[in-house]
Amino acid sequence: MTQEARAKRGEISAARPKKLRAVIEGTLDRYAGSTQVHLIGDERWGSYPAWRRENGAGRHKRNGVREVTAEAAQSFADHESARRTKVQHTRGVRVLKPIAVKPKDVHAVPFISDSTIRFEMSIFGAIMHYAVKKRYVPASQRFDERPKLKTMRRDEFTLEEYRKLHTVGRKWIGETDKPSSIWYRTVTYNMILIACNTGMRPVEMKNLRWRDIMPTKDREGREIVVLFVQGKDKSRKLVAPKSVGDYLERIRTISKATEPDDRVFTNVTGKPAKTLYSSLIEDLLNEANLREGTQGVPRSTYSFRHTYATLRLQEGVDVYFLAEQMGTSVQMIENHYGHVNTIKHADRVLQGMAGWELPQADDAKAKASKAAETHDKSKRGQRNKPR
């Protein structure tokens, strides 16, 4: 009731109360069941993420799929049977009956994303806070800290995989002769190159307009591109190499929307793209056999941003500058890409270990040894030279 009143006042969207109700009457009700509110303690609160991942069906297929237990499969099958209905006519009366769905038909269930769990736990916490406020439960049952979640990191592409994607992408465009397919594949391919060379978020690419692209030169006189990018509530400028300008120009050449206020990424008719060609990206990744990363999680458009960050760090770009460029915090970079530093500084990490010798050190030793040998020969030659 409170949320519906807020929606009427315009404080929140009209869809918000429905979304909250769906969570409360759905997953939270299944989890808490008939447990009385005053019996919900720390253990019940902290166990929710694990339960949700084990028993819940996720909404976003892009987060990957996992095999489920027989019990979970049966639960999902029962749910699907109740949801799918067919009309039967019995003695002239229309009757809706469930269509039976067998557990074996439920092959896999989408992963639950961290953002989904956090959202649901924020509602869970708000309910408990309301109960404390109404004095249904003691203040000790107010849960402000949410359990830490084990994040399934979407894999970036290695440099070799990126080069493969580059090669397969060009071939992929040439494998179709349908004009609209050629158009979409060309735009998708160039969008991937732009994403991997700028680190833009998908929403920032969706919002990019032609007026936001500014060719210029750096202090050394080299041509670069400055992009003004906007997310949901933040904006910033980022710099990109001239090659990004070339990729953008390829899109402009075939686009039907090239006015300053037009979006860069559109459909073939010139209207703004809604999904950023997600099905085409999936098709290309499957074609290149790069759909899944090392963790078995399907890669998505966001993987291109991860690729940019990883390759920049491997090249030694300062974390502070990279955070500014990507519109995030230094802490986020360090938390999510700490593995890059370990690989980049393998010589320091492995220094002193048995059997570990640096190639550079070997080369230096070999050169020093050869120089010493040459010097000794020269000295012997001088001693033996007749006067």
Image (cartoon, grey):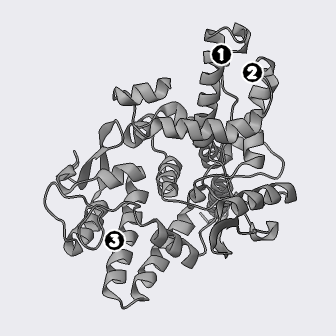
- Please give left or right for residue 288 compared with residue 191 in the image: right
**What residue did someone put label 2 on?**
37
Query: Mark 3: few, some, or many residues within 10 Å (few <14, many ≥20)?
Result: many
Asked if residue 351 can be seen in this view, the reply is: no
Residue at the far front: name it.
91
Q: Inspect the image, locate mark 3, and give the three-letter code of the amino acid beneath it.
A: Val
Using the image, tell me which numbered label, if any, was put on residue 187: 3
Q: Residue at x 31, y 86 (%)?
A: 179
Query: Mark 1: few, some, or many residues within 10 Å (few <14, many ≥20)?
Result: some
- Whichever of labels 3 and 1 marks the residue nearer the N terminus, that label is 1
**What residue did someone put label 1 on?**
131
On the image, which quarter does residue 114 sit in? top right
Q: Inspect the image, locate mark 1, and give the three-letter code of the amino acid beneath it.
A: Ala
- Please tell me whether mark 3 sits on a helix, a strand or a loop: helix
Q: Inspect the image, locate mark 2, and give the three-letter code of the amino acid beneath it.
A: Val
- Marks 1 & 2, CB-CB < 8 Å contact: yes
- Marks 2 & 3, CB-CB < 8 Å contact: no
Residue at the far left: name it.
259
- Please give left or right for residue 248 compared with residue 147 in the image: left
Q: Residue at x 70, y 61 (%)?
A: 80
